[in-house]
């Protein structure tokens, strides 16, 4: 039964028959002992939390509240929760994270005398040229704007060899440095690609 219905209205001075009372009380007990369905509750009615028997699943603030842990069910049907409502979570990490170090590989060049050593920047950022028994030209390929790279130049056993650099280089100080010509000595230069075929260049170390 969804609603309580007054079947018989009692009038002052009238004789009350048992059936009249029984009918009214039957309606009441059916509702109370049964379940409320479509109950006509006023919009501003408040229901005490102690009267709510709620089945709650899940946890609030790491703890599952017991039934009746709510204060009031207001007209907006918003449940107000008593106590802390901070949600917390634990990040569980399984296993051990392994970090592998990456070592820059060195790309080696051994051009012949009077040849061009073409530095391929897709192979890495450290390039080592061992001079032949003669002068060489250095060229660049596959550069990326913003890329930084180094070129090492090592004289052969007799020394006195020179290089012709690739074009459009802005050297620190305004001019290309003089290459160390001592036998078996190494010079190292650093470069940064600033645009298409344009570079900033720096002396890292000479006569090493």
Image: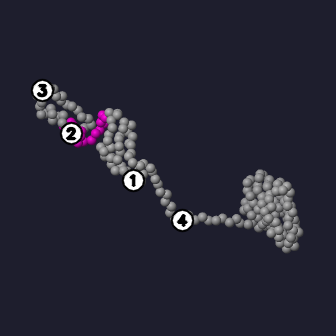
Depth check: 166 or 47 in front?
47
Determine which residue is flagged by label 1: 63
* 3D distance between C-alphas at marks 4 and 2: 66 Å
Crowding near pointer 2: few (<14 within 10 Å), some, many (20+)?
few
- Span highlighted in magenta in the image: 26-41
- Give the colour scheme of this rendering: one colour
For residue 116, above or below residue 57? below
* 3D distance between C-alphas at marks 1 and 4: 30 Å
- Examine the rendering and report whether any part of residue 3 can be seen: yes
Q: Nearer the viewer, mark 3 or mark 1?
A: 1
Magenta stretch containing residue 28, yes or no?
Answer: yes
Mark 4 vs mark 3: which is more N-terminal? 3
* 3D distance between C-alphas at marks 3 and 1: 60 Å
Query: In which quadrant of the rendered view does residue 167 lie?
Result: bottom right
Q: Quadrant of the C terminus?
A: bottom right
Mark 2 vs mark 1: which is more N-terminal? 2
């Amino acid at each position: 039964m969804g609603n309580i219905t007054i079947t018989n209205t009692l009038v002052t001075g009238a004789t009350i028959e048992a059936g009249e009372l029984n009918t009214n009380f039957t309606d009441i007990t059916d509702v109370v002992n049964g379940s409320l369905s479509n109950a006509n509750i006023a919009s501003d009615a408040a229901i005490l939390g102690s009267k709510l028997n709620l089945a709650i699943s899940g946890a609030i603030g790491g703890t599952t509240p017991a039934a009746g842990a709510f204060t009031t069910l207001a007209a907006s049907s918003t449940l107000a929760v008593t106590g802390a409502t901070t949600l917390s979570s634990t990040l569980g990490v399984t296993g051990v994270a392994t970090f592998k170090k990456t070592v820059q590989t060195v790309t080696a060049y051994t051009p012949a005398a009077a040849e061009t050593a073409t530095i391929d920047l897709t192979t890495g950022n450290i390039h080592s040229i061992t001079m032949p028994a003669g002068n060489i030209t250095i060229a660049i390929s596959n550069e990326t704007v913003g890329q930084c790279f180094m070129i090492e130049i090592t004289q052969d056993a007799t020394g006195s060899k020179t290089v012709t650099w690739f074009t459009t280089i802005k050297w620190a100080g305004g001019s290309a440095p003089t290459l160390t010509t001592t036998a078996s000595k190494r010079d190292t230069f650093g470069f940064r690609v600033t645009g298409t075929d344009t570079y900033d260049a720096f002396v890292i170390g000479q006569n090493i």
